[in-house]
Amino acid sequence: MSETLLTAAFLYAQITLGFAGCLAALRVLRGPRAQDRVLGLDTLYVIAMLLFLVTGMRTGSLFFFEAAIVIGALGFVTTVSMAKFLLRGEVIE
Amino acid sequence: MIEQNLILILVLLPFVGAIAASTISVNSRNAAAWLAALVMLGGLAALSALHAQVAEGRVPRAVINWIPALHLNLSLRVDGFAWMFVGLVLGIGLLVVIYARYYLSKTDPVPRFYAFLLAFTGSMIGLLVSGNIILLVVFWELTSLLSFLLIGYWYQNPAARDGARMALIVTALGGICLLAAMLMIGQIIGGYDLDLVLASGDLIRAHATYPVVLGLFLIGAFTKSAQFPFHFWLPGAMAAPTPVSAFLHSATMVKAGVFLLVRFSPALGGTGAWFFAVTGTGMATLVIGALIALFRHDLKGLLAYSTISHLGLITALAGIGSNGAIVAAIFHIANHAVFKASLFMAAGIIDHESGTRDMRRLSGLMRLMPYTGTLAIVASAAMAGVPLLNGFLSKEMFFAEAVEWHNGTWLDNALPYIALVASIFSVAYSLRFIMTVFFGPAPVDLPKTPHEPVPWMRRPVELLVLTCLVVGIVPGLSLGPLLNMAAQSVLGPETPWFSIAVWHGFNTPMIMSVLAMALGAALYFAFAMRISDGPEGPPLLHRLRAQKMFERSLLALSWKWPRVLHRLAGTERLQPQLRLIVLAAIAAGVATLWAGMRLAPQPQLTALDPAFAVMWAVGALCGMGAAWMAKYHRFAALVLLGGAGLITCLTFAWFSAPDLAVTQLLVEIATTVLLLLGLRWLPKRKEEIADDRLASARLRRLRDLAIALVMGLGMAGVAFVVMTRPTTSNIGDWFLRNAYHEGGGTNVVNVILVDFRAFDTLGEITVLAIVGLSVYALLRRFRPAPESAESPIQQATDAPRLKDAMFVPSVLMQWMFPVMIVLAAYFFFRGHDLPGGGFSAGVTLAIGLLVQYIATNVRWIEARLIVLPIRWMGAGLLIAGGTGMGAWLFGYPFLTANAQYITLPLIGPVPVATAMVFDLGVFALVVGATVLMLIAIAHQSLRIARIRAQDEPQPSEQAAE
């Protein structure tokens, strides 16, 4: 029973995350401002991290955890550098 | 064993000396000269230690096996011929070293000269003692290369540059032909060992490709020894410092060609083709060289053409190939070396002391420099072949061979007459040298007043002229034994003993000698005035300059025709180039796959996961969006690219490649920042491009879309077909099975990288280091487009200051630094067994450092934290290479890894692999290279701001950047 429930929950989580990914990608594609695109990409990163975790739980594998860590600890670097680029016109001054 | 070491010393000592000389300070002339002289003396000592063996007819060898399976071995051998020749090289080299010490001026970078000279000596000796014909070609090319450097020593002088380039092109071209000939010989006889080649003469001569081999071989030898029609580079090389000319013309370089002819005459010679090609070319060169020499006004030019002529004589003898001819050839090689070296040195003294080499201006120097004059007169008498001097003996042997040897062809019948004509000219030009320079009225308006040089500048000439006399008067006692030793090593041990005597009786060669001298003197005195007043070169022929023709054809080949080709078929625009590349890829793919590629009968399909299907759609959309936006909205394209990259990582993880996913994510992050850094310097987009709306532009885009679609669908199709095939056993299975047993790690990817294929990884990190350094070097002189050189509008004075804008983020980012370091350590240490490894760890640490730069600014961070990327890179390469070499200590091949468990107190057994040390090298190098590139770009804004601060940037200050 709990296994069925868990499977259903994982499936649901994955599909909703996929849907969220679509929405985030729409923002990245359409903009309209550059800031919207950056935020969209950041969201995509978070979604990818969650998807890694969910998939890891579903398959019972530890290996997805690494990728999630990388996004968690370093994924923000992309967003920060893009934000700084928009804010200051260059990343490192 | 001892002789093996002696031979190695003989070859390696000059190279070691060259390296040592190149480290000597520019001003220490004496130190460099002493070093060079000691190296030459050391070589002579090693050589004399070998004499006893060689004189017994044995051949000392030193063989170091390199790739025995391909017959490529570092094999060195010293037989009698090589012994004599090496002695000549070292002896004259020693004299040249002494002479050059006094010849070169104080402003010349003397250590560089001696370094080149020593390296050149080393390659010449290597060429002489090579026992492997491929090794011989390697040394052959080294002599070409180093003679280029020597001739171009005064590179401020355009004539020196041109002469050096011409010499390099001609001799290196010949070197390629020689290599081809040697490879073909190797194919014919199945090995590259010189002894084997010399013993398989019949096999080579009988082979169908013999004419081709012979042609290529002769082009190699003729270009080197300046035989007609390749003779023109040698006069061009006159722009070299005179000591170099003396060395190149006497014992080395040009003599390498005739050495090769004599050396290979047992293997390739003895046929009609050999006789006609070699003797024919030799005789032609002999006459043409002597003729042109008579008409040159430049002292060194006369000597250069005389060298060409004498080399023609030696070549002709090698072509005749009888026992007597080979002995005469070897004898003349030695004699010519001695008198030509002394003549060049004398000419150098005259040039040095009087300031000109023009024979029309020089005159009556006998009164001003009697010693030098006497020496030069004796040496040029030897050149003319006057009795009681060494040149006479070998020339007479040449006459004897020309008269007595017969094979019944027309060339053979003509030989004595051609020899006589050439000798007449040779007497005439020698006489001209003596008469115009040393006799006649006192010289007027010379740049300097000539006087005797310092004694030590004259000593080498004195010694050489003394040798001329000793060999000329008592040949049998002086050079006789050596000559016979050399001849026996070429012709075989049963060769009869040749006794050289001054007096052979009143025979035909004697009559020819007397005739040549009488007619030569008559010719000179009859035409002396006309020659002086005439143009530089023989009448009529002087307009036909081989040098000019060469330059014209070089210009056409290297500049005009490529330009035409480029205009017809090339483009400087990126888009057409990319289009052509993609179209070529499509064509190649279709051509190879059309017939063979079919879907497997039972495709192995995987069930579709809805969540990933959606994410792939997202990734594909992002990718296409990036392509769509790339032209006008670079930033948007970059963001979309980030999205596509992220989905790629997701895919890797999904296809159970967590290692790849992690690495790809890290690279993705670093790349995005890198591109953003570069984006700063790209020009802003133009708002509207009118042409873009034209029908032709739309059509072009449509066509490009079609190409892109075909390519993309094609790639997808190929990938689909390959991936749905049932898996067969492949090398991957082997790695999976053996990773733990052989490499001691459970992460197969990492074990492959640092153990099984560690050599590839070593190569890759080396490339990475090179790339990092190139990026750094290129950015040192970076000049942005004028419109993007200004400070970005976001940094206008009324905008919020950096510190305020980044206040909170910068605190967070600085706190994340330790976390990132721990993450890097985590990836590094678990790498061998679980996902991670040196590469991921390196990129992680680099990102951590980068974040600190983003959080604050360059000045702030560099006042607190200094990264020395180049040291990181160097350390990384050393560690990785050192680990590999460490395996040698235990008797294993390079990069053999070892893994075992060791017990640490408190922690217990810990797996340790040498591969981890190797991985540490990878880690350090990746950190260094990544940081170097990122920071090099990051520094640009500081640099450009500094340039902008000075209103008009000075070019010299930019050069100092």
Image (cartoon, coloured by chain):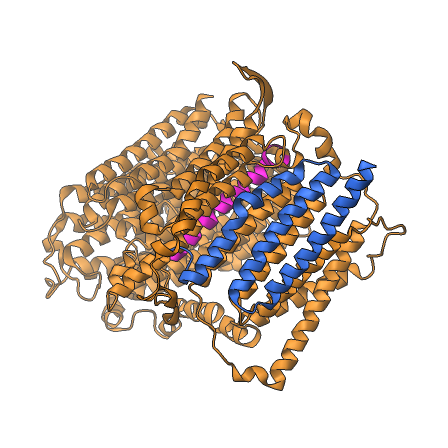
Chain colours: A blue, B orange
**Could you tell whether B923 is left or right of B103 in the image?**
right
**Could you tell whether B280 is left or right of B247 in the image?**
right
Name the main secondary structure of what is drawn in magenta: helix
Most extreme residue toward the right, as rendered?
B601
Q: Is residue B779 above or below residue B867?
A: below
Q: Between residues B817 and B874, which one lies in front from this camera angle?
A: B817
Q: Is residue B892 visible?
A: yes
The C terminus of chain B appears in which quarter of the rendering? bottom left
> Is residue B551 a member of the stretch shown in magenta?
no
* Residue at screen point 43% across, 53% down: B775
* Residue at screen point 28% across, 60% down: B946
Q: Is residue B469 visible?
A: no
Q: Position of residue B864 (x, y in %)?
A: 32, 42
Location of residue B598 (image quadrant)? bottom right
Q: Between residues B308 and B476, which one lies in front from this camera angle?
A: B308
Q: Bounds of the magenta span?
A: B752-780
Q: Is residue B428 above or below residue B473?
A: below
Q: Between residues B574 and B678, which one lies in front from this camera angle?
A: B678
**Could you tell whether B618 is left or right of B372 in the image?**
right
Q: Position of residue B909 (x, y in %)?
A: 59, 17
* Residue at screen point 45% across, 49% down: B772
Q: How many marks?
A: 0
Q: Is residue B879 above or below residue B462?
A: above
Q: Position of residue B79 (x, y in %)?
A: 47, 32
**Could you tell whether B639 is left or right of B500 in the image?**
right
